[in-house]
RNA sequence: GGUCCGGUAGUGUAGCGGUUAGCAUAUCUGCCUGUCACGCAGAAGGUCGCGGGUUCAAAUCCCGUCCGGACCGCCA
């Protein structure tokens, strides 16, 4: 390699030296007699000047955008009148230019990449990834990997890989299946997470484990969800919840310090699941801004406004002054999240106008003092059963954030949400199910509630790590007592036989001397998305899939030929046409 | 499975019943010795996603469909 430096490494010390650079032509400014080339590599961009009497001129004249070039020349100060500050005070006067490779005209202009539609960017991802923004994101990701590895290694964690081809289990997300050629008619599943394996590593005595684990879930996608994604997976033995949380706080603070030079204040604030839902309408509240709900159920109980009088819960949130159009939009959001409507009031002096104002004469003074809504401001109400009311108003709260930029400014807010319920009643299937996963330990004081009508009150030793309204991690203390595990399976309707059929190997292991243990998994892509200030997880993944799970560049998934199918013993069902 | 938004030269967009389908940029050619989103002049480039319908006439209106995006359901 003839390269003497990466472009971004050039500095005053290289002045008057001959350098050899290799990279891509970022831009060409051909003044006729004089040619300027911007040469780009992953570290930066530098201007190259090619003079007409130079031996390099003929070759430089061939260069076009995205050509790969090698340039030799003297790195020197620009003429005084041409200096622009910093490294732009310098340029390279080319003595030799070599085209290393020509390039077809790019499918889109790289420096306009942020306004090019995403499917074009994904189709030509190798071009998109040349853009400095994308290079920065992937380098940020690499630094974060190095940071967690360094930290966890120093803390005595052992990196262990777990299988990608494993066993399908009926619970949780839909599995991706892989047919087994050697065992026709049987299938592996790709792991939704290494949950059982990491617990087995604790049983095996590894004490502290971590892995950057690829995980697979065959569910519909979102801006923050990919079918294959990366978890930073960790598990620790002989710990209680407090130990896990404390270590995680130091780890995350360390990553932010290493990667972004940002100091996160420790400890992270904590709120219970109930508090998060009750005040912010989300189990992953965005706490960069307040706009907490105020409970006014009592004010309206039995009062004139029918919709509120009999509601289980009436919550109100103070908002800035809103136009009718904005209120309509927020009502649409509320309805999409299960509310029947979105009642509103506008503060006018010490009273209210608009919306439901004719119903609130008696409550006006109390509404003012409880909410402290500003003059001209709007009050937004959701009523119904508690869960529905807070969820709908929570969605409105986020819509207000986006409407008014309430969380703008590139700040980070991390918190813990704890004390999740152990069990959740599934209305559709009329049965109890776990909220986190079936291996989560209940709070020891609540174990006696299993099997009683109060089992919905059992608190789990589970915790979520929340950053700017995204769940970037979740974990729990695990059940290490087979008797408790049995109670848990019974509570979610697994007979001992069913439990054994699905998890027999694990239950056997649990009885083989299991240390108390617990852990957490970070949604690594999501964390990086927030750290990078990106709107989508796809911005921090080199080769992501679109929201239909398709790789638009490689064109996956795709049909395979009959011989391949026959070999793995799979037949494709005739596609059923929908409609008539 | 559902809701909403979008699809017009390579890219980004305007046009929303009758236009030679406009603009910017990229591309190509010519001119140009201090540009830095270089400039100037010119050229080429379009199955207005696809199919059907309404109409004298459809990029434009209607229906269907495909594709892209956001969200709900779903995602322990």
Image (tube, coloured by chain):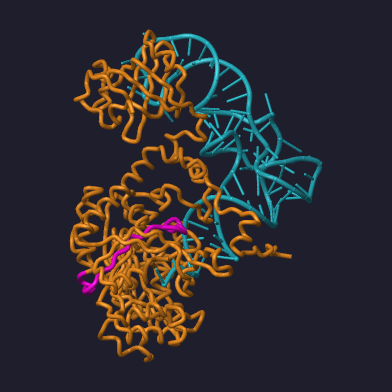
Residue at (25, 31) in percent of width and height:
A9
Give left or right: position of A126 versus B60: left
Residue at (36, 69) in percent of width and height:
A197
Of residues B59 and A44, the one nearer the viewer is A44
Residue A245 lies in the magenta stretch: no
Of residues A140 and A533, the one nearer the viewer is A140
The magenta-colored residue range is A222-243
Residue A445 shows in this picture = yes
Quadrant that contains the N terminus of chain A = top left
Quadrant that contains the C terminus of chain A = bottom right
In which quadrant of the rendered view does residue A557 lie? bottom right
Residue that lies at the very extreme toward the front in this rendered image: A182
Q: Position of residue A448 (x, y in %)?
A: 30, 90
In which quadrant of the rendered view does residue A486 lie? bottom left
Question: Vertical placement of B35 versus A170: above or below?
Answer: above
What shade has chain B been given? Answer: cyan
Residue at (39, 55) in percent of width and height:
A402
Colour-to-chain, orange:
A
Residue A365 shows in this picture = no
Question: Vertical placement of A566 versus A446: above or below?
Answer: above
Give left or right: position of A297 versus A169: left
Residue A237 lies in the magenta stretch: yes
Q: Position of residue A400 (x, y in %)?
A: 38, 58
Question: Vertical placement of A23 versus A504: above or below?
Answer: above
Q: Position of residue A198 (x, y in %)?
A: 33, 68
Residue at (32, 63) in percent of width and height:
A233
């Amino acid at each position: 390699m003839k390269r003497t430096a990466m472009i971004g490494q050039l500095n005053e010390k290289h002045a008057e030296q001959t350098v050899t650079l290799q990279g891509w032509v970022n831009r060409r400014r051909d003044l006729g007699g004089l040619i300027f080339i911007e040469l780009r590599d992953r570290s930066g961009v530098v201007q190259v000047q090619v003079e007409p009497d130079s031996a390099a001129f003929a070759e430089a004249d061939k260069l076009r955008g995205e050509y790969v070039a090698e340039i030799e020349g003297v790195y020197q100060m620009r003429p005084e009148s041409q200096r622009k500050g910093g490294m732009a005070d310098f340029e390279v006067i080319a003595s030799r230019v070599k085209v290393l490779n020509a390039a077809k005209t790019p499918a889109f202009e790289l420096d306009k990449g942020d306004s090019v539609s995403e499917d074009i960017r994904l189709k030509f991802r190798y071009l998109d990834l040349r853009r400095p923004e994308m290079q920065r994101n992937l380098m940020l990701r690499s630094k974060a990997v190095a940071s967690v590895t360094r930290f966890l290694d120093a803390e005595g964690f052992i990196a262990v890989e777990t299988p990608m081809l494993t066993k399908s289990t009926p619970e949780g997300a839909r599995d991706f299946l892989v047919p087994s050629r050697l065992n026709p008619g049987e299938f592996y599943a790709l792991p939704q997470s290494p949950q059982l394996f990491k617990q087995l590593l604790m049983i095996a005595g590894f004490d502290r484990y971590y892995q950057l684990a690829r995980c697979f879930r065959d569910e519909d996608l979102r801006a923050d969800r990919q079918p294959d994604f990366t978890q930073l997976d960790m598990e620790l033995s002989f710990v209680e919840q407090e130990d896990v949380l404390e270590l995680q706080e130091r780890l995350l603070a360390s990553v932010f310090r290493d990667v972004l030079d940002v100091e996160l204040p420790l400890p992270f604030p904590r709120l219970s699941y109930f508090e998060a839902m009750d005040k912010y309408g989300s189990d992953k509240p965005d706490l960069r801004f307040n706009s907490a709900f105020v409970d006014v159920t009592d004010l309206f109980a039995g009062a004139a406004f029918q919709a509120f009088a009999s509601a289980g819960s009436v919550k109100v949130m103070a908002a800035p002054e809103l136009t009718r159009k904005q209120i309509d939009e927020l009502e649409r959001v509320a309805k999409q999240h299960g509310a029947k409507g979105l009642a509103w009031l506008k503060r006018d002096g010490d009273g209210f106008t608009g919306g439901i104002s004719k119903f609130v004469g008696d409550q006006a003074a109390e509404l003012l003092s409880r909410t402290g809504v500003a003059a001209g401001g709007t009050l937004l109400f959701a009523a119904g059963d508690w869960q529905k009311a807070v969820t709908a108003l929570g969605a409105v709260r986020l819509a207000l954030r986006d409407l008014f930029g309430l969380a703008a400014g590139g700040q980070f807010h991390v918190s813990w949400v704890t004390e999740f319920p152990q069990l959740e009643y599934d209305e559709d299937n009329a049965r109890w199910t776990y909220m986190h996963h079936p291996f989560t330990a209940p709070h020891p004081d609540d174990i006696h509630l299993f099997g009683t009508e109060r089992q919905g009150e059992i608190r789990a030793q589970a915790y979520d790590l929340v950053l700017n309204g995204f769940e970037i991690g979740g974990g729990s203390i695990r059940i290490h007592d087979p008797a408790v595990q049995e109670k848990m399976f019974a509570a979610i309707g697994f007979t001992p036989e069913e439990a054994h059929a699905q998890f027999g190997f694990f239950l056997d292991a649990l009885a083989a001397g299991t240390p108390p243990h617990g852990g957490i998994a970070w949604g690594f892509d999501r964390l990086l998305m927030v750290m990078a200030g990106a709107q989508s997880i796809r911005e921090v993944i080199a080769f992501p899939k679109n929201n239909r799970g398709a790789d638009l560049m490689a064109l996956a998934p795709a049909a395979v030929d009959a011989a391949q199918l026959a070999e793995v013993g799979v037949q494709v069902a005739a596609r059923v046409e929908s409609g008539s």
